[in-house]
Amino acid sequence: MRLGFIGTGTIASAVVSGLSGSGHAICVSRRSEARSAALAAAYPEITVAENQAVIDASDVVFLGLMADAAPAILRDLRFRPGQRVISFMAGLTLGALAPLVAPAAASAIMLPFPGIAQGGSPILALGDTTDIDALFGATDTVFALKDEAELQAYVCAQAVLSPAVAMVARAADWIGAQGADRAAGETFLRTLVGSSLLGSECGPMIEALNTPGGYNQRLRQHMERAGMPQALWDGLDALNH
């Protein structure tokens, strides 16, 4: 498949890295020149071109632009019938994108995460996910969402990653304060939390960790008394408005 990328920021670069070696011809825009040059140097199937040349060379075009800058950039570009456009921009609806890329089809919004570079990462998708499934379904997990409201809920909820990581880092600091090796403690906690979450749904895991008087139960109940669940809920509500 001939794939083009307009914008080569952190996420677009991760997607390109994840696609490398899959037999696709990939053309990336010269925008963010240091990143585009690094990608072309790292992977033989990648070429670098100006925005219009990227579109001319591609059947599927990925847009890795800032939503507020996209209209000014796209209005000067010429798409063609039969092309499919996949946007990484959560802040620009498919309805708003469609006239900017016509006569190509604004087929989907795709929200990947940096782990897509290695595979095994979640991908949020809204719209026609046919190309997304074909390109990433074998290596990553595609979550096809039904509408803009559901996409927004997922976008807000994914922000739980930052406080979760901060909690692990703080617990590692506490291990270090007890005289133990902080770096080893962090590695242990990352392995523990990551493998546990991948191995079980949250409900059964909470129940399994609910041994009366056990360390897990006591710390969870302490955090609940301190207001953590309501603070999380309130924070998510604030992001959604």
Image (cartoon, grey):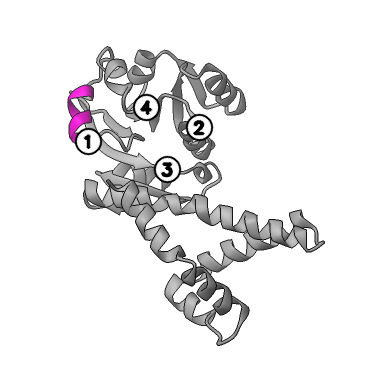
Instruction: Give the residue at x 35% y 43%.
Output: 132
Marks 1 and 4 sit apart, C-alpha to C-alpha, by: 15 Å
Are there few (<14), some (14-19), or many (20+) residues within 10 Å of tag 4?
some
Disc on the earlier residue, 1 or 3: 1
The residue to which callout 2 is attached is: 10
Which secondary structure, mark 1? Answer: helix
**Is residue 97 in the magenta section?**
yes
Tell me the residue that label 1 is attached to: 94
Q: Give the Cα distance between marks 4 and 3.
A: 15 Å
Sequence-wise first label, 2 or 4: 2
Residue underneath mark 4: 66
Name which residue type carries label 1: Leu
Foreground tag (2 vs 4): 4
> Which residue lies at the image location 32% right of the left edge and 34% below the top edge?
87
Q: Is residue 193 above or below residue 151?
A: below
- Under mark 2, the amino acid is Thr
Question: Which of the two labelled residues, at mark 1 and mark 4, occupies the earlier sequence position?
Answer: 4
Point out the tag, 3 or 2, that comes first from the N-terminus: 2
Q: Is residue 96 left or right of residue 143?
A: left
Q: Quick one: which residue is furthest to the right in this view? A: 179
Give the residues in magenta: 94-100
The secondary structure type at the circle numbered 4 is loop
State which quadrant residue 234 falls in.
bottom left
Write down the residue under mark 3. Answer: 112
What is the chief secondary structure element of the magenta stretch?
A: helix
Contact (Cβ within 8 Å) of mark 1 with mark 3: no
196 drawn magenta: no
Q: Amino acid at mark 3?
A: Pro
Do the numbered discs 3 and 2 sit on residues whose CB atoms are within 8 Å? no
